[in-house]
């Protein structure tokens, strides 16, 4: 994928992280006086705090977050509501969203099969042996 393509935000894990960031961004935009870069930075800090509390890896960089906001401004991306959990997730603009199911409710078969997870499982196996 191109480094600045809307498709990057559609894959499973980046979509979850992008959607979390956009939830903070939209909340702060509608409930504070923050605008522009200050709004993006505050939203990104909230995203980082949440990711660190959960012990997860940071998937979304500040540059990607800024680019995504620009994609929303250009009507290239939209939010779609999951029919199962009711959460709002990043989706391509003008894609049909009726019946949309998010990546958390319908995880791909390879979800969580990262190199880090494999290394952690190997370390755990060695520790118990």
Image (cartoon, rainbow, N blue to C red):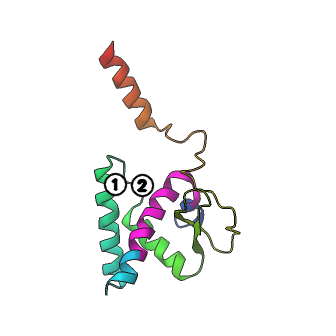
Q: Would you identify the image quadrant in which residue 59 lies?
A: bottom left
Q: Start and end of the magenta stretch?
A: 10-26
Q: Which mark is residue 51?
A: 1
Residue 98, given in percent of the width and then of the height, sits at: 69, 67
Locate the N terminus by quadrant. bottom right
Q: Which residue is mark 2?
A: 59
Whether the magenta-drawn stretch holds residue 17 is answered as yes
Q: Is residue 111 left or right of residue 64?
A: right
Relative to 37, does residue 105 appear above or below in the rendering?
above
The label shown at residue 31 is none
State which quadrant residue 89 falls in: bottom right
Q: Earlier in the sequence, mark 1 or mark 2?
A: 1
User: 107 or 39, which lies in front?
Assistant: 107
**Residue contact between numbered discs 1 and 2, judged by CB atoms under 8 Å:** yes
How many numbered badges does the structure rendering display? 2
Residue 12, image x, y percentages: 55, 52
The quadrant where residue 50 appears: bottom left
Give residue 104's position: percent from left, percent from top.
53, 51
| Residue 79: in magenta span | no
Is residue 1 visible to us here? no
Q: Residue at x 69, y 62 (%)?
A: 99
Give coordinates of residue 72: x percent, y percent.
Answer: 53, 77
Which one is in front, 60 or 21? 21
Q: Is residue 77 left or right of residue 59?
A: right
């Amino acid at each position: 994928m191109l480094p600045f393509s809307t498709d990057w935000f559609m894959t499973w894990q980046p979509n979850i992280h992008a959607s979390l960031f956009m939830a903070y961004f939209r909340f702060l935009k509608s409930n504070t006086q923050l605008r522009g870069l200050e709004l993006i930075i505050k939203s990104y800090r909230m995203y980082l705090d949440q990711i660190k509390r959960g012990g997860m890896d940071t998937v979304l960089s500040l540059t990607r977050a800024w680019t995504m906001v620009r994609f929303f401004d250009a009507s290239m991306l939209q939010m779609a509501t999951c029919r199962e959990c009711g959460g709002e997730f990043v989706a391509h603009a003008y894609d049909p969203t009726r019946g949309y199911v998010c990546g958390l409710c319908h995880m791909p078969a390879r979800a969580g099969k990262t190199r880090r997870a494999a290394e952690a499982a190997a370390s755990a196996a060695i520790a118990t042996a």
